Image (spheres, helix red, strand yellow):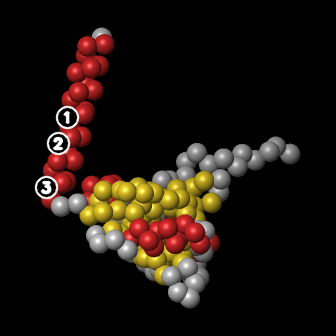
């Protein structure tokens, strides 16, 4: 019997590009996520969006991270046993990591946003970031810096030729 290749190269990755534009990312953390079977299959089919998501920290009675506002579409083959597309999902992290995040977001203007959702060795991981909101002028400055770096790289590549 032939061995089955367990490596999935075609698994989707979901990125929250809007978060990097709207926020300055101070710190990142990779966490697991608690999902049902139909949610995992829907994510594998590419039926998810993390653009509207945010994370809250609940300290008492038990330390927990909760992911809000993430849309995971309905998996049609699941039949009548479906999940609701948008509901609160538990994120899995160590207690000390959750406490560190709680201390960081106690500062004014800090929040936690999901940056990326992807598969890693068959498990779904979420990269979350502690972020500080940007004002409109900061966004324009970031865009200008990115454009100047891009032009500099183009000029350097022309010189190398």
The residue indicated by pointer 2 is: 144
Residue visible at 49% across and 68% down in the picture: 100
Q: Residue 148 carries which label?
A: 1
Contact check, label 2 and label 1, Cβ < 8 Å: yes
Of residues 159 and 10, the one nearer the viewer is 159
* Residue farthest to the right, as pictured: 1
Of residues 103 and 13, the one nearer the viewer is 103
Residue visible at 26% across and 60% down in the picture: 22
* Residue farthest to the top, as pictured: 161
* Quarter of the image where the N terminus is located: top right
Q: Residues within 10 Å of mark 2 (few under 14, many from 20)?
A: few
Task: From this view, report whether residue 143 is shown above or below residue 70.
Answer: above
* Quarter of the image where the C terminus is located: top left
Describe the element under mark 2 as helix, strand or loop: helix
Q: Residue 137 carries which label?
A: 3
Does 139 sit left or right of 114 as displayed? Answer: left
Of residues 119 and 140, the one nearer the viewer is 140
Query: Which of pointers 3 and 2 lies earlier in the amino acid sequence?
Result: 3
């Amino acid at each position: 019997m032939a061995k089955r290749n367990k490596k999935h190269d075609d698994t989707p990755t979901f990125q929250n590009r809007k978060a990097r534009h709207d926020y300055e990312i101070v710190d990142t953390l990779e966490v697991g996520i608690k999902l049902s079977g139909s949610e995992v299959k829907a994510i594998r089919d590419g039926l998810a969006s993390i653009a509207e998501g945010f994370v809250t920290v609940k300290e008492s009675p038990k330390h927990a991270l909760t992911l809000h506002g993430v849309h995971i579409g309905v998996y049609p083959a699941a039949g009548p046993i479906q999940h609701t597309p948008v509901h609160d999902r538990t994120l899995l992290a160590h207690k000390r990591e959750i406490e560190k995040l709680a201390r960081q977001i106690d500062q004014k203007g800090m929040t936690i946003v999901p940056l990326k959702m992807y598969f890693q060795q068959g498990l779904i991981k979420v990269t979350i970031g502690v972020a500080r909101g940007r004002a409109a002028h900061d966004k324009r400055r970031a865009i200008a810096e990115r454009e100047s770096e891009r032009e500099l790289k183009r000029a350097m590549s022309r010189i190398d030729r």
